[in-house]
Amino acid sequence: MSSYQDYEKAERKVISENREVVFDAHQELGVTSVTVVYEGSGDSGGIEDFSILPADCSVEKEVVVQDLVWGNNTPEKKTVQIKEVIENTSMGIVAIDHGGWENNEGGGGEVTWDVETRVITLEHYDYFVERNYSTSLY
């Protein structure tokens, strides 16, 4: 297995463990849903919007999660704000499923955390350039 494959395997495990921490914390805080919107092109992109439901809830809470640094496939425990975990985990999921999404014409989408069902849904779209070709003889 290549070093990237090893890292991706470790990252999937970290995402699986951290998602449970996030869902538990959301239940405590009364949050029912979190949506992270991302978009980019031209080799750069990132989070454009972050929303929670109900809107009067807060995600101001520190949690202990696993943290993974490229080149080291052994996660370490880290205390961070829950919003940071949501953003990092959401973008990690995007990178696993759609690596390079921000390159060239780019793309975007939404990552939705449904607390009741404990499901994270990734909806992604890619931008592309279409070329129509025709030949005419007169």
Image (cartoon, helix red, strand yellow):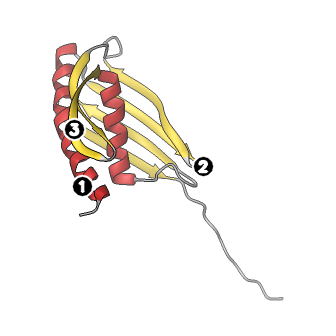
Q: Nearer the viewer, mark 1 or mark 2?
A: 1
Badge 3 crowding class, 10 Å Cα cut-off, few under 14, some 14 to 19, many 20 or more, is some
Tell me where residue 51 appears, x and y as whole percent. 39, 24
Q: Earlier in the sequence, mark 3 or mark 1?
A: 1
Q: Are marks 3 and 1 in contact (CB under 8 Å)?
A: no
Is residue 80 left or right of 40 when viewed as pictured? left
In this view, the residue farthest toward the bottom is: 138
The kind of secondary structure element at disc 2 is loop
Q: Quadrant of residue 50?
A: top left
Q: Earlier in the sequence, mark 2 or mark 3?
A: 2
Badge 1 crowding class, 10 Å Cα cut-off, few under 14, some 14 to 19, many 20 or more, is few
Q: Quadrant of the N terminus?
A: bottom left
**Residue 115 appears in the rendering:** no
Pointer 2: what residue? 42
Q: Quadrant of residue 112?
A: top left
Pointer 1: what residue? 6
Pointer 3: what residue? 75
| Amino acid type at mark 3 | Pro
Q: Nearer the viewer, mark 2 or mark 3?
A: 3
Tell me where residue 12 appears, x and y as whole percent. 23, 46
Q: Is residue 57 above or below residue 106?
A: above
